[in-house]
Image (spheres, rainbow, N blue to C red):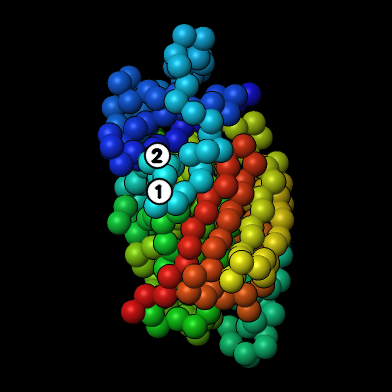
């Protein structure tokens, strides 16, 4: 079984850093502090020696509960999973899956605007890499993702995300939702920053899984479900095996003349081709599941 890291909030005792092994949760706050910044910076998060040490603790350390129970949230719950860490910078890649490219091309042809743009990006040598946000733009499990006040077609993008150290090594993975104001991007590509960068525009979690524990990152099942008024309005599946570009290629372009910080995050593209007409509405519940990482749940909220 793989080991993963989560962060838990208690109404009584505050934040706790924990690891999950065999679906049981162990508190390691006394060992590494109340966030994962230090073990990301010093590389222990992806150290086989450190991970094996944590696994060995499970023979003597009392678990504080079952992982699935901490994923549940209600105002009455005393302890629940929160954002695992706040990345110092978030980047994202666009048009890396064929189905997403096809859906975007259908929209451009229908509106007779920017025709061929997404097909070009999909086949080009250079990937589309763009800045997605800063720590305050990010939210975690059970927090609200935003529908921009000036958008009528804000959409969900279910993605695998890479966590880097400053040398450019992928040290861990998490799940992400690259929330996008699609109508703003579709109007004009020069409006991409406004379509992508806004408070509550990036969600990540529920866990961080070290690279050496994830298995093959390009063979992970991804699922997205949208619930509206207690009814499922969308359910789709995908797999990271359909990613057109290798992670090495994406990393090479991310680092090209660009110094990143420890904990920098890269969203690798939409693994589930969600039709863009399924725009979010106030109160929608979005579940993004990535195999070996878990389910990231958020509620959408229209900004004023």
Q: Residues within 10 Å of mark 2 (few under 14, many from 20)?
A: many
Q: Position of residue 247 (x, y in %)?
A: 58, 44
Q: Would residue 257 appear left or right of 274 to someone viewing this image?
A: left
SS class, disc 1: loop
Which residue is at the front of the view, 127 or 218? 218
Q: Can residue 295 be seen by looking at this rendering?
A: yes
Q: Say above or below: 103 vs 212.
A: below
Residue at image location 64% in from the left, 41% down from the top: 291
Which residue is at the front of the view, 92 or 23? 23
Which residue is at the front of the view, 167 or 300? 300
Q: Say above or below: 298 vs 56.
A: below
Which residue is at the front of the view, 79 or 151? 79
Residue at image location 71% in from the left, 54% down from the top: 238
SS class, disc 2: strand
> Which residue is situated farthest in the bottom direction here?
112
Q: Would residue 153 appear left or right of 245 to someone viewing this image?
A: left
Quarter of the picture containing the C terminus is bottom left
Q: Which quadrant would residue 234 be assigned to in this image? A: bottom right
Q: Position of residue 246 (x, y in %)?
A: 62, 45
Q: Can residue 124 be seen by looking at this rendering?
A: no
Q: Are marks 2 and 1 in contact (CB under 8 Å)?
A: no
Q: Which residue is mark 1?
A: 76
Residue at image location 28% in from the left, 27% down from the top: 33
The numbered dot on residue 239 is none
Q: Residues within 10 Å of mark 1 (few under 14, many from 20)?
A: few
Q: Position of residue 302 (x, y in %)?
A: 42, 75
Q: CA distance from mark 2 to mark 1?
A: 9 Å
Q: Position of residue 32 (x, y in %)?
A: 32, 24
Q: Nearer the viewer, mark 2 or mark 1?
A: 1
Residue at image location 37% in from the left, 75% down from the top: 303
The numbered dot on residue 79 is 2
Q: Would residue 224 appear left or right of 126 to someone viewing this image?
A: right
């Amino acid at each position: 079984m793989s080991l993963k890291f989560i962060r838990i909030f208690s109404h009584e005792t505050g934040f706790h850093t924990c690891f999950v092994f065999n679906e049981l949760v162990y508190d390691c706050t006394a060992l590494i502090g109340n966030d994962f910044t230090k073990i990301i910076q010093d590389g222990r998060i992806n150290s086989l020696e450190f991970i094996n040490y944590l696994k060995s603790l499970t023979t003597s350390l009392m678990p504080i509960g079952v992982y699935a129970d901490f994923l549940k949230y209600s105002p009455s719950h005393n302890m629940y999973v929160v954002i695992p860490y706040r990345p110092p910078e978030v980047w994202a890649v666009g048009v890396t899956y064929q189905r997403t490219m096809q859906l975007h091309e259908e929209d451009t042809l229908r509106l007779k605007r920017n025709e061929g743009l997404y097909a070009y990006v999909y086949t080009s040598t250079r990937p589309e890499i763009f800045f997605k946000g800063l720590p305050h733009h990010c939210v975690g499990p059970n927090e609200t993702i935003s529908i921009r006040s000036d958008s009528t077609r804000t959409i969900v993008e279910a993605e695998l995300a890479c966590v880097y150290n400053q040398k450019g090594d992928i040290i861990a993975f998490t799940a992400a939702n690259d929330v996008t104001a699609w109508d703003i991007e579709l109007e004009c590509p020069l409006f991409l920053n406004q379509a992508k960068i806004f408070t509550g525009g990036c969600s990540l979690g529920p866990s961080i899984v070290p690279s050496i524990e994830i298995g093959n990152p390009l063979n992970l099942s991804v699922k997205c479900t949208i619930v509206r008024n207690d009814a499922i309005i969308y359910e789709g599946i995908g797999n990271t095996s359909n990613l057109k570009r290798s992670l090495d290629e994406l990393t090479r372009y991310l680092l090209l003349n660009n110094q990143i910080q420890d904990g920098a995050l890269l969203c690798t593209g939409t693994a589930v081709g969600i039709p863009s007409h399924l725009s979010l509405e106030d109160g929608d519940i979005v579940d993004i599941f990535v195999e070996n990482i878990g389910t990231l749940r958020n509620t959408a909220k229209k900004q004023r």
